[in-house]
Amino acid sequence: MTYYSICNQKQWGNALLIFFGWLIVSCQPQPNATSSVQTKYNVLFIAIDDLRPQLGCYGESQIISPHIDRLANQSLMLTRAYVQQAVCAPSRNGVMTGLRPDAIGIYDLGTFFRDSVPDVIMLPQHFKDNGYQSERIGKIYHRAHGNRDDSLSWSPKSGVPSFQSLGVEPLSRGDTVGLEGSYPHIDGKRIPYYATSVPEEQLADNRSLNYAMERLEALQDTSFFLAVGLVKPHLPFVAPQRYWDMYDSANLTIPERNTPQGSPEFSLANFGELRKYHDIPPEGYLSDEKSRNLIHGYYASVTYIDDLVGDLLNKLDELNLAENTIVVLWGDHGWKLGEYGSWCKHSNYEYDTRIPLIVKVPGETKGQKSNALVESIDIYPTLCKLAGLSPPTHLQGKSILPLISNPDHSIKTAAWSQYPRGKGGNSLMGYAMRTDRYRYIRWQERNSTQKVVAQELYDHQTDPNEMNNLAALVENQELVAKMDSLFNIEYELAHQEALSAI
């Protein structure tokens, strides 16, 4: 309605009534479910490499993780969160772009995402473009294997140091070198696990943590998006001796070395990542001693990182920033610790694709736990909603905000993961659809998507460790057909490409 259309007293009276009615309503206090959207929160974005949801807050009594547990008690904890691909670069690309691997077209470690989607608006870039100081410390994007960081994501002069040598005296024993740092070597290969006694400030994650606390002090009077990436418990499992001493290796259980019955031969990888390390055989299972040492090292590394997370959270409290800072803690994928006789990630199974995801919103989250199916691409739209930012139009995830007020709510029927394989000269893609009860995996040729090579179906109600492939049994073919039909429907919904903004 224009000014000139309100030309008589009656119309003016109606307009004024409407205006004052709107004014009264708009001034009323809003319910908690939406109040977070109206506050300009800071964001502390904590990414942890290779972190399984094997934490105290997730019901794992063997792991010592008091600080992450404390965060979970103040947060919304997602018990069934899944990554889009269980390997560093594609997983992190998904979180930061809000896109699935098929939309980006990248499934490897070395390809820079802007070579495929050059104009995509990244999560930290979106906050930067909306007035936030956006900074990175440690590993956020995968920057190895020829890949690199994204300058468009971060504010100018964000002050991220290169962490050059501290000038410490090199340590070696015989042919073991590099003992003063986070990556010791023997015979030219990295050692897969090591209990170090060097000053902790020399370790890479300690240095990232200390710098992160410096940046919190510098940023406390600004609106910030601070991304802190901690590398452990990624290989090698190097942690200070005191964390190893917290665990008795004799009490550590080695999983049975049984592959899922009826699974295709290519469903698991040969854990080539670990086999590059010193004294790891090129083929076959690992010995009990080697397995127990690796498990011990992983546990020690998790508790070490948990302490660093605690220091970071304490710094928030010290600076009175906790009351106005959203905290998101997530793992970039899972990690097998000897399950199936296998190690590392690189598969479509639950051990590899399920992650810890914890979201703290000041005044909103108070130890809620949700079993809803969520995906790592849901982090981007969630943070936009919490910060009151309009999400970019290309996002393929969904906000998990409804789960804060109602943890029993469901936001999607299925969570998706995928992993490529090569078999007999054919290039395969395996898609995993995780529903409330089942994990259904369909392997198909990349160049002929209707040519299905293999199927897997696991019932989490009776087989939570995914040991029996129901799809391999004749009596389950009706169930497999139903899951395949659901797969086709849900795949189309989940993989819609709204890329108009790219």
Image (tube, rainbow, N blue to C red):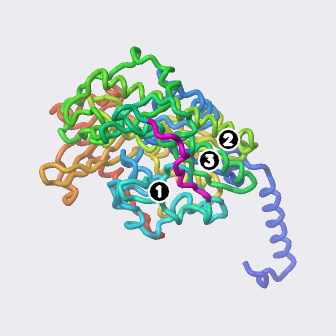
Q: Which kind of residue does numbered mark 2 sit on? A: Glu
Position of residue 211 measured from the top left corner of the image (x, y, whole percent)? 62, 47
Q: Residue furthest bottom?
A: 4
Q: Are marks 3 and 1 in contact (CB under 8 Å)?
A: no
Q: Few, some or many C-alpha atoms within 10 Å of disc 2 (few <14, some 14-19, many ≥20)?
A: some
The circle on residue 211 is 3
**Magenta-drawn segment:** 159-171
Residue at horizontal 31 percent and vertical 42 percent from the top: 188
Residue hosting label 2: 364
Q: Is residue 55 visible?
A: yes
Above or below, 56 against 374 in this view is above
Q: Few, some or many C-alpha atoms within 10 Å of disc 3 (few <14, some 14-19, many ≥20)?
A: some
Q: Are marks 1 and 2 in contact (CB under 8 Å)?
A: no
Residue at horizontal 49 percent and vertical 51 percent from the top: 140
Residue at horizontal 63 percent and vertical 50 percent from the top: 43
**Horizontal side of residue 272 vs 89, given as left or right:** left
Residue hosting label 1: 98
Position of residue 203 measured from the top left corner of the image (x, y, whole percent)? 52, 39
Tell me, yes or no, whether the highlighted magenta stretch contains residue 161: yes
Q: Quadrant of residue 349?
A: top left
SS label for mark 1: loop
